[in-house]
Image: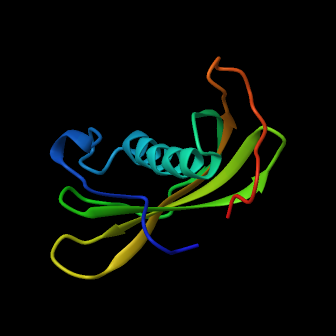
């Protein structure tokens, strides 16, 4: 899946859970931002998330680590795009990377009246 990251951000102290690790909800929100960016670009307009599924958190991040989010369109429907997202953490003081999260987001494309609209044209 790796290509160019859609999101790249550093984990800060406010992104930690009570146990000192990076909060899974923060990871999911960064993944949703990256997937939403791709959905809007591919759909050439407004796209809203309607579901988020299949999350796994195989690794951990620490404060100061850099997060990169990679996304790809895996399926299209009449009005929807399903996007797989992968989050990779890189240690702050080195090059070691760890896959820290993955999940799937489904977006519906909306028209100017916030009604579902068709996915059109070549989306790749």
Observer-nearest residue: 123 or 9? 123
Q: Provide residue 98's location: percent of width, then percent of height.
A: 40, 72
Observer-nearest residue: 108 or 68? 108
Residue that appears at 67% across and 58% down: 73
Q: Provide residue 1's location: percent of width, then percent of height.
A: 59, 72
Q: Is residue 107 above or below residue 56?
A: above
- Give the left or right position of residue 60, taking residue 65 as reference: right
Q: Is residue 12 above or below residue 73?
A: above
The image's colour scheme reads rainbow
Residue that appears at 46% across and 51% down: 34
Where, quadrant-wise, is the C terminus in this rendering? bottom right
- Give the left or right position of residue 102, taking residue 60 as reference: right
Residue that appears at 50% across and 63% down: 58
Residue that appears at 31% across and 50% down: 22
- Identify the residue at the far top of this view: 113
- Identify the residue at the far bottom of this view: 95
Q: Is residue 29 above or below residue 117?
A: below
Q: Provide residue 112's location: percent of width, then percent of height.
A: 62, 23
Number of numbered discs on residues: 0
- Give the left or right position of residue 46, taking residue 26 as reference: right
Q: Provide residue 59's location: percent of width, then percent of height.
A: 43, 64
């Amino acid at each position: 899946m790796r290509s160019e990251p859609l999101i790249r951000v550093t984990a800060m102290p406010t992104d930690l859970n009570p146990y000192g690790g990076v909060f899974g909800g923060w990871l999911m929100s960064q993944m949703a931002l990256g997937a939403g960016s791709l959905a809007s670009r591919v759909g050439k307009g407004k796209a809203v998330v309607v579901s988020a599924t299949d999350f796994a958190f195989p690794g951990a991040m620490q404060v100061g680590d850099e997060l990169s989010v990679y996304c790809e369109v895996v399926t299209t429907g009449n009005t929807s795009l399903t996007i797989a997202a992968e989050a990779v953490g890189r240690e702050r003081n080195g090059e070691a990377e760890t896959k820290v999260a993955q999940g799937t987001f489904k977006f519906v494309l909306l028209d100017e009246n916030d009604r579902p609209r068709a996915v059109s044209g070549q989306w790749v």
